[in-house]
Image (spheres, rainbow, N blue to C red):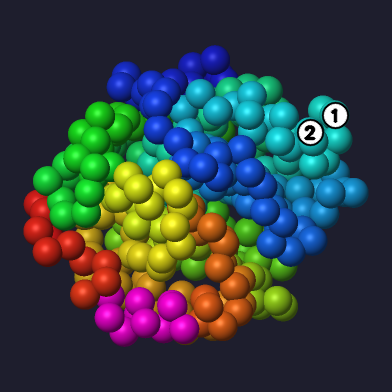
Amino acid sequence: MENNQMTYGSDYKTLPITSLTSGIGVEVLTDLFCYNVQIVNIVLVGTPDSSEFVLIDAGMPGSAENIISTIEERFGTNAKPKAIILTHGHFDHVGAILELVEKWGVPVYAHELEIPFLTGQKSYPDPDPTVEGGVVAKMSALFPNEPINLGAIVESLPSNGNVPELPDFKWHHTPGHTPGHISLFREEDRALIVGDAFVTVKQESLYAVLTQEQEISGPPRYLTPDWQTSWTSVKKLEALKPSFAITGHGLPMARELLASNLKKLAEDFEQIAIPDHGKYV
């Protein structure tokens, strides 16, 4: 499939939601940069003085120019990543993917179980605006949900856990939020790029999303259809004993604060993360 045949879902649109940290970048480690696009984080892996870097996830619809300028500010004019790795295919993680691929011509990788949602074959389950949690959950019926089509541009990640262009990282299958959701872990410094397997903000609450008030939480409730599998994924990530975590939503968390909060989430997931009511509960 040619690049010009790639398409977003018919319901793709920019959304007027933001947070106080939108446009702010945090250097978690020398080669790990977390940048907030409205309400979601992208991650740049690579040192600023190098042309060898990778982009994790692709932001909100309409954010391509923002992402490009952020990358050029960090890596230099006309810089482009070696690859784009997707933790999953929800609209807020692939929102600018077509424009970025058209500009850079770089490969995109995702878990094989996520490929149908990225090649126009399958839609995710509808968001659940009835789920317990707050105003953002109620707004979720407006969120884009039709599958995008990346055609042959998107490739399955290697089955051995290796991450293309990131030899120090391994990918871990962390389903529940989506069937092919992945998180990335580097053993050497115990750095974890979580995606939405857990987040560090109550993503359903408009106040928390706006202020980015830090609180460890399960995956966003309004877009999570499988809670028991999500719990298993959190336990898997807690067992890795990460020292640093960059989540898809919320501020990065590190060291003792991360360890104690993630342990509590893994133990008390039912009370902390699983909503009291909702169509997927």
Specify the quadrant that holds the C terminus. Answer: bottom left
Residue 188 against residue 172 in the figure, above or below: below
x and y percentages locating residue 242 in the rendered image: 57, 77
Secondary structure type for disc 2: helix
- Per the rendering, the mark at residue 72 is 2
Q: Residue furthest top?
A: 4
Q: Is residue 43 left or right of residue 78?
A: left
Secondary structure type for disc 1: loop
Query: Which of the pair 72/107 is nearer the observer?
Result: 72
Does the magenta segment cover residue 178?
no
Residue at image location 65% in from the left, 66% down from the top: 169
Figure label count = 2
Residue at image location 36% in from the left, 65% down from the top: 217
For the stretch drawn in magenta, what is the main secondary structure?
Answer: helix
Q: Is residue 17 left or right of residue 126?
A: right
Does the magenta segment cover residue 262?
yes
Residue 6: tell me if it is visible.
yes
Query: Which of the pair 169/64 is nearer the observer?
Result: 64
Write down the quadrant of residue 263 in the picture: bottom left
Dot 2 crowding, Cα within 10 Å, few <14, some 14–19, many 20+: some
Residue 89: tell me if it is visible.
no
Boundaries of the magenta span = 260-269
* Residue type pointed to by label 1: Thr
Residue at image location 22% in from the left, 70% down from the top: 228
Mark 1 or mark 2, which has the lower sequence index? Answer: 2
Instruction: List the residue tagged with mark 1.
Output: 77
* Residue type pointed to by label 2: Glu
x and y percentages locating residue 120 in the rendered image: 35, 30
Query: Which of the pair 264/176 is nearer the observer?
Result: 264
